[in-house]
Amino acid sequence: MLRTLKDLFDAVVTPQSAAPEREHSLQLATAVLLVEVMRADDGFGEGERDAVVQALCRTFPMADDEVARLIELAHEHARNASDFHQFTSVLNDRLSTEEKVRVVEYMWQVAYADGHLGDHENHLMARIAGLLNVTHGQYIAAKMRAKPQPV
């Protein structure tokens, strides 16, 4: 009887207490993908870091110190990850197609932030977009929207 009550209690309490953890995993997965694009070059500059911060702030309402900590965690996870599947699967489970395309667009903004688009960045972008089940047309449209316009 006690076990049944405990199981019932756990079933009722867990979904509510898991909500912040689910949100954090979504934030972290998004941040890791953005950081991976930033790290794709030999070095990354302030422009790329600013693009990551802007993308995260547009996507998730967070204070500056929370964004800084999220980026720090994303760097740690990116360094230790063997592949992108663990991050893209979180986004695939929780985001709509339009939201995933928006993430790809933000990734392109990070890639363009240093004024140079390298081969490794292009390859990385195509790979991640494929893992996110973003069609080639959506991928190209996101790339064109993110591309800086000549002045």
Image (tube, grey):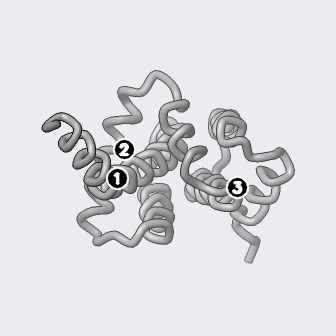
User: How dense is the environment of label 3, judged by Cα within 10 Å: few (below 14), some, or many (20 and up)?
Assistant: some
Q: Which residue in the structure is indicated by mark 3?
A: 97
**Residue 107 in the image: above or below residue 73:** below
Tell me the SS state at disc 1.
helix
Q: x%, y% of residue 115? A: 62, 56
Q: Residue furthest right?
A: 137
Viewer-nearest of labels 3 and 1?
1
Q: What SS does tag 2 mark?
A: helix
Quarter holding the C terminus? bottom right
Does dot 3 land on a helix, a strand or a loop? helix
Looking at marks 2 and 1 on the same chain, the residue that comes earlier in the sequence is marked by: 1
Q: What residue do we see at 39% from left, 47% from top? A: 25
Checking the image for residue 74, the label placed there is 2
> On the picture, is 1 further left or further right than 54?
left
Q: Amino acid at mark 1?
A: Pro
Disc on the earlier residue, 3 or 1:
1
Please report the residue visible at 38 percent of the width from the left and 51 percent of the height from the top: 22
Contact? badges 3 and 1 (CB < 8 Å) = no
Residue at the far left in the pictured view? 2
Residue under label 1, please give it.
15
Q: Nearer the viewer, residue 23 or 50?
A: 23
> How far apart, in angstroms, are the residues tagged by discs 3 and 1?
24 Å
Quarter occupied by the N terminus: top left
Looking at the rendered image, the disc whose residue lies closer to the viewer, 2 or 1, is: 1
Q: In percent of the image, x 66 and y 36: which residue is there? A: 131
User: Can the viewer see residue 117 in this picture?
Assistant: yes
Kindly report the distance in space between the C-alpha atoms of the residues bearing marks 2 and 3: 23 Å
Whole-percent x and y of residue 65?
A: 24, 65
State the residue at coordinates (70%, 61%).
Answer: 98
58 horizontally vs 144: left or right: left
